[in-house]
Amino acid sequence: MPPRISAPALVACALCLALSAPQGAPQSKQKTEERRKGARPELESRSPETQPQEKKGFTIGVNVDLVVLYTAVHDKAGKFVGGLKKENFKVFEDSVAQTIASFSQEDVPLSMGILIDVSGSMRNKIEMVTKSALAFIKASNPEDQVFLVAFNDQVDLLEDYTNDIDTITDSLDNIIVTGGTALYDAIYLGVQKAQKGTKPKKAIVVITDGEDRDSYYKLDELLAKVQESDVAVYCIGFMNAAPEKGLFGRFSKSASEKAREALAKISEETGAKAFFPQKTTEMGTIVSEIAHELRNQYGIGFVSSNTAKDGSWRRVKVTLEGANAPQYHVRARTGYFAPKLP
């Protein structure tokens, strides 16, 4: 006869399971569902007459069929590798080799956003973060147009496109830290805003210390958004990746570990990079690396051999040729959506 389990034991087991479940999950899920019922979040935009205008002196040829992959190459020590030539690279689309139609390594101006998490948990980090954000802007191309976003459970456009350092400094000095974290909303709206910029290259830098809790948009919607854009998303996350000990001593991924994976995935899809510093003192080195990379990337253009205008996702890969190729790591966006006929 199989052993019987007494009613008190069943009650105790059920209580144990209930206590081991994440306590904040139901409330967080309910809050997210309530947000989904509301209006989509938006960033306030400037009126057309005050949108940033392209300065004379910099022109770029436009070909609607030309796909440009801004590409970074690093050695095993993480140092950026410059001076490579067109013949050092190969481009593949859906495993089919493509002909490189254009190639350059120029300091191309950016339409760029800096997105800063100002939730309550950032209180002891915000001073170093704002100083590093300002240092990043000063290390970037003087012709870059920068917008500034602060986010907690809301996403606010603090400063529209500008290259006025004093204006940006004033906005950074007046940041208020409070509230929750609508991380996915901030990135989604930041990408949307960067796409409207007038400069040839687009990028955003996201600085956060927590997982998403308050967003309207879901991760899969955000990934679809970054894939269809030409915006590089660099993420800096202060997150502990240690697994959590759950019921019966089993370890599972912590919320922070899942958040790290999400940020890494977002950056990877766009050809950028995610950084996970342990201390705020690492910020200076990180923003310097990002600024240097953005000013020295290779621009590799090709016209797809697949002429179908079907709106399909095309996976792309950039590789290196030559004896030193195995010593280097190549990073570019992972694909693009083909144009689609109306």
Image (cartoon, helix red, strand yellow):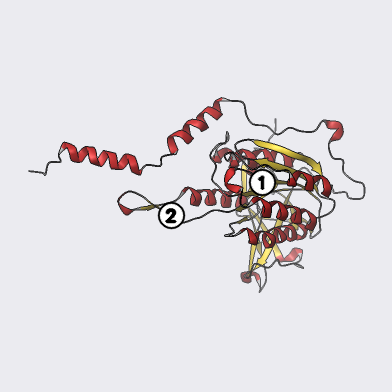
Residue reaching furthest to the left = 1
Residues packed near mark 1 inside 10 Å, few (<14), some (14 to 19) or many (20 plus): many
Q: Earlier in the sequence, mark 2 or mark 1?
A: 1
Residue reaching furthest to the right = 56
Question: How far apart are labels 2 and 1 at the CA level?
Answer: 26 Å
Specify the quadrant of the image occupied by residue 317: bottom right
Relative height, residue 231 to residue 329 (above, below):
above
Relative height, residue 110 to residue 326 (above, below):
above
Q: Nearer the viewer, mark 2 or mark 1?
A: 1
| Numbered badge on residue 243 | 2
Residue reaching furthest to the bottom = 323
Relative height, residue 216 to residue 122 (above, below):
above
Q: Is residue 109 left or right of residue 254?
A: right
Disc 2 + disc 1, Cβ < 8 Å: no
| Numbered badge on residue 126 | none
Query: Looking at the rendering, in which quadrant would you find the N terminus?
Result: top left
Q: Amino acid at mark 2?
A: Pro
Q: Residue 96: give x, y in percent of width and height.
A: 63, 54
Q: Residue at x 65, y 37 (%)?
A: 155
Of residues 309 and 175, the one nearer the viewer is: 175
Relative height, residue 85 to residue 101 (above, below):
below
For disc 1, the marked residue is: 116
Q: Residue 140: give x, y in percent of width and height.
A: 79, 56
Q: Residue 273: give x, y in percent of width and height.
A: 63, 56
Q: Residue 98: give x, y in percent of width and height.
A: 69, 55
Of residues 111 and 275, the one nearer the viewer is: 275
Secondary structure of the residue carrying numbered label 1: strand
- Residue 163 showing in the rendered view: no
How many marks can you see? 2
